[in-house]
Image (cartoon, helix red, strand yellow):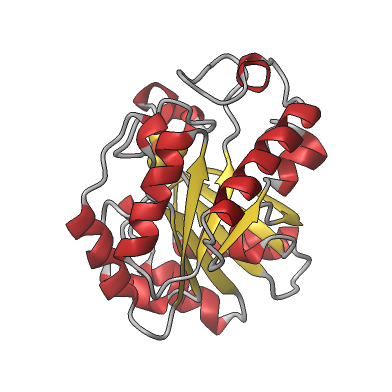
């Protein structure tokens, strides 16, 4: 029997707020459990074991039933997020979901490679920069890219809070030059702050400060153009602009 998938929440339809699929209608399936503990994680309820009681073990069929209910039976992109969804047994979900007409994007930090990455339509690898206080295992990141192969649309997405993160993004881009790379300004959680950041007002605010976000985005754009780094795409988080840090939208 297939192992069950730990699901934290299923919500939508909404839009993808980040990266290569920004603006695309989607339903999110957020899995529980993560092997990282990023300093600025904004989904700790899908990470920390003390929230385990909120994670429901579900079969692939039960997940797809809920997705189909939310989409009123229309085919839609399913975005699998976390936590780290690579920790979950997702292959049956991809197999059955594709048979039902759904497509799949999965977002992971690239710390665990799975052979079923090759069955995804989109793989978003989001290795974490120094401000997360996590360190990157470059071999595992490369293994994720290799596991996805040539049929899956694989992209990189790097969150940038400060100069150090920017330098890290340059390093990732240099290590994997064949992959499209998306840079995104960071969005600290309301009660967290990040040391040594470019804009103290932004990073100490209880709610996203749109003016400060604009300034931070402008700083990042200037940084990229000054370096002539023209292969990247620089984006804000669209859902934060629309709904702030509200959960489930
Ligand atoms: S990898 Fe993602 S979900 Fe896990 S702790 Fe970091 S930001 Fe949170």
Residue 135 coordinates in the image, percent (x, y): 26, 38
Residue 104 coordinates in the image, percent (x, y): 54, 70
| Residue drawn at x 53%, y 17% as measured from the top left | 192
Residue 142 left/right relative to 95: left
Q: Quadrant of residue 228?
A: bottom right
Residue 81 coordinates in the image, percent (x, y): 50, 51
Q: Determine if residue 1 is in view.
A: no
Q: Determine if residue 45 is in view.
A: yes
Q: Nearer the viewer, residue 236 or 224?
A: 224
Residue 92 vertical position relative to residue 204 in the rendered view, above or below: below
How many marks overall? 0
Q: Quadrant of the C terminus?
A: top right
| Residue drawn at x 31%, y 51% as measured from the top left | 87
| Residue drawn at x 46%, y 35% as measured from the top left | 163
Q: Nearer the viewer, residue 177 or 242?
A: 177
Q: Quadrant of the N terminus?
A: bottom left
| Residue drawn at x 69%, y 15% as measured from the top left | 206
Residue 107 vertical position relative to residue 42 in the rendered view, above or below: below
Q: Quadrant of ligand 1?
A: top left
Farthest residue to the left: give it.
139
């Amino acid at each position: 029997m297939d192992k069950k998938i730990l699901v934290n929440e299923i919500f939508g339809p909404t839009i993808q707020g980040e990266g290569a699929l920004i603006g695309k209608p989607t339903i999110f399936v957020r899995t529980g459990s993560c092997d990282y503990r990023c300093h600025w994680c904004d989904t700790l309820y899908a990470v920390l074991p003390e929230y385990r009681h909120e994670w429901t073990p579900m079969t692939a069929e039960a997940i797809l039933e809920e997705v189909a209910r939310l989409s009123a039976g229309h085919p839609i992109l399913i975005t699998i997020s976390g936590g780290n969804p690579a920790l979950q047994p997702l292959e049956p979900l991809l197999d059955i979901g594709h048979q039902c007409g759904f497509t799949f994007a999965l977002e992971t930090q690239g710390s665990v490679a799975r052979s079923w990455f090759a069955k995804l339509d989109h793989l978003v690898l989001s290795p974490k920069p120094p401000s997360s206080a996590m360190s990157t295992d470059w071999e595992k990141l490369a293994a994720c890219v290799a596991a996805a192969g040539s049929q899956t649309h694989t992209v990189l997405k790097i969150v940038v809070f400060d100069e150090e993160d920017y330098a890290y993004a340059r390093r990732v881009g240099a290590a994997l030059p064949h992959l499209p790379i998306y840079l995104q300004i960071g969005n600290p959680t309301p009660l967290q702050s990040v040391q040594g950041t470019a804009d103290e007002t932004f990073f100490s605010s209880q709610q996203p400060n749109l003016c400060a976000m604009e300034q931070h985005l402008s700083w990042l754009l200037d940084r990229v153009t000054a370096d002539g780094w023209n292969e990247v795409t620089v984006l804000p988080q669209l859902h934060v602009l629309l709904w702030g840090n509200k959960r489930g939208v």
